[in-house]
Amino acid sequence: MTEVPDPAGHGAGRIGSFTVLYDAGCPICRTAHLWLDRRDQLVPLEFVPAASAEARHRFPTLDHAATLRDLTVIADTGSVYTGDGAWLACLWALADYRGLADRLAGPSMLPLARSFIAAASAVRRSTRDPGYGEACDDSCR
């Protein structure tokens, strides 16, 4: 099953915030960023362009080329979520969508969620701004 943050948040494992590494060269990702940012958040979301100088500085051990292929979310606890886990973590952070994230991560709904996320990723790759990539120097903001 895809890992979704533990809503109980026991002890030192409690998540206080997420950093979302999103593809700033992708119109879908930019729209998702704005949509997420405008929602009530139970867990604060901070958005940083994937593969930017800031992302490379803050998370030097990540594969930054991979962060341009798959949405990546890093919890302040150090947990890293990618792909469908990252999308579900973003929903889980929102006041009105936590229950939906939990349902989508369940065995009956996860295949549907994965199909939707895969379709969005395919569209993302075809609509990405040309010239934006691993060499992002923060002009991608």
Image (spheres, helix red, strand yellow):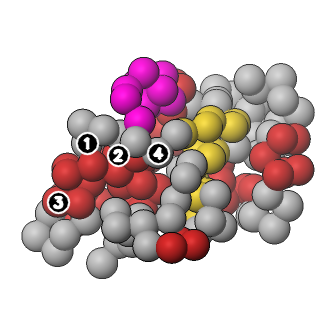
Tag 1: residue type? Answer: Tyr
Q: CA distance from mark 4 to mark 3?
A: 18 Å
Q: Give the residues in magenta.
A: 32-41
The kind of secondary structure element at disc 3 is: helix
Disc 4 + disc 3, Cβ < 8 Å: no
Q: CA distance from mark 1 to mark 3?
A: 10 Å
Q: Residue 54: image x %, image y %?
A: 83, 41
Of label 2 and label 1, which has the lower sequence position?
A: 2
The residue that appears at 85% across and 61% down in the rendered structure is 60
Tag 4: residue type? Answer: Val
The kind of secondary structure element at disc 1 is: loop
**Residue at numbered disc 2:** 91
Q: Is residue 12 above or below residue 134?
A: below
Instruction: Confirm whether the magenta stretch covers residue 33.
Output: yes
Left or right: 56 as drawn, with respect to 36: right
Q: Residue 21: image x %, image y %?
A: 63, 45
Disc 2 + disc 1, Cβ < 8 Å: yes
The kind of secondary structure element at disc 4 is: loop
**Residue at numbered disc 3:** 103
The kind of secondary structure element at disc 2 is: helix
**Residue at numbered disc 1:** 97
Tag 2: residue type? Answer: Leu
Left or right: 40 as drawn, with respect to 75: left
Foreground: disc 1 or disc 4: 4
Left or right: 1 as drawn, with respect to 90: left
**Residue at numbered disc 4:** 43
